Amino acid sequence: MDLLLNDLSIHEQFHDLTDLQRAFAQLIEMRRVAWSFEREVRCTRLIYGRKPIPGVELLSAINRISNQNLKRAILSWLTRSGPFWEESQKHSGDDWLECEGELIVTDTGVGEAAFRMLNDEKCGLITIYPSDWTYNPLLVTWKRGIEATDTTVMSVNNWWAPRELENDLARMRSPIGSWQELAESSVSSFDGLTFFEESFDPLFKLPFSRSASNRIGQLLTTLSSLVRAYDADGNRTGEGHKIYSKFFTGERAWFSDSSDSEKRRFREELKFSDRTLQISGLSCTWHGKINYTTPIRMHFSWPIQAGKPLYIVYIGPKKTMR
């Protein structure tokens, strides 16, 4: 998997040098994590034009950092040695790439990552924290030009925390080849989620599908990100609101509640129990959707509450088939 730095995550969000230094130290740590998995994080040659501090371009801002070792590491990587993704750039200025429906991301790391995935190359993004880009995944729309009607939407993995990057890269090291491997990998990787003991069992009766397995991984990643997006007072953070708006609302939502008629007709089928956790008859009508020959659903507890488990109770054939 290629990893590209999300240059758009530098957008004049820092007003304190201490916060700036902390953010870039975490960025360097993420690069170290990538190195430990024999991966490099590539940046763009145009990144020096970004402004981490209002009115202050990257070079000037970095030169204000007091930690000399950190300053040298950042300057060497982002402005001198790279590596730069332009050396093997895949998309051109003629490709129309949008994120969030309106923001043009052509000629950015976000656009390049999406275009590489469009061409069946694995690619993800490394994002600076805090920023307006701390949600996962990013959905990027490609079309041949502004007037084109045919579009393709790419889902791009996005990391801003070293621990999550390390967990996911470890999981990706060996491609998952069975539902059992998916279950074991998920339980060990997503420590922010609580799985019912038999949550994956319904999948074992189905032929394995790598695309469905990848989709399940994306859904779990999104839920894990949302669980972490609550502050000390139990309120959903700005990051959490972005994730909820993007993936839990609208016609193309990845997650939704069952309809009222389904809740009435399938009331018992939508209750789940776990002997180990000593939970009986937990109603879980919210679900994620997975494309498969037989529709697959991932049911989970709702609403999410800060400091309380988010239970993944069932992954298998749709229970509300009419």
Image: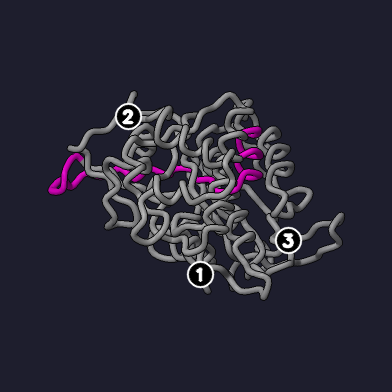
Residue 275 within the segment the image draws in magenta: no
Residue in the picture at 74% in, 41% down:
188
State which tag comes first along the sequence, 1 or 2. 2
Which circle, 1 or 2, is nearer the viewer? 2
Residue 169 within the segment the image draws in magenta: yes
Residue nearer the viewer, 65 or 213: 65
In this orientation, does residue 297 appear? no
| Residue 149 on image: x %, y % | 18, 47
| Residue 137 on image: x %, y % | 48, 49
Circle 2: element type: helix
Mark 1 and mark 2: Cα distance apart in space:
48 Å
Which circle, 2 or 3, is nearer the viewer? 2
Left or right: 111 in relation to 292: left
Mark 1 and mark 3: Cα distance apart in space:
18 Å
| Residue 67 on image: x %, y % | 59, 46
The amino acid type found where label 3 is placed reads Phe
Left or right: 212 in relation to 79: right
Mark 2 and mark 3: Cα distance apart in space:
51 Å
State which tag comes first along the sequence, 2 or 3. 2
Which mark is on residue 86?
A: 2
Q: Which residue is mark 1?
A: 259
Circle 3: element type: strand
Circle 1: element type: loop
State which tag comes first along the sequence, 1 or 3. 1
**In the displayed image of the protein, which residue is found farthest to the left?**
147
Q: Which residue is mark 3?
A: 272
Residue in the picture at 45% in, 34% down:
123
**Residue segment shown in magenta:** 144-171
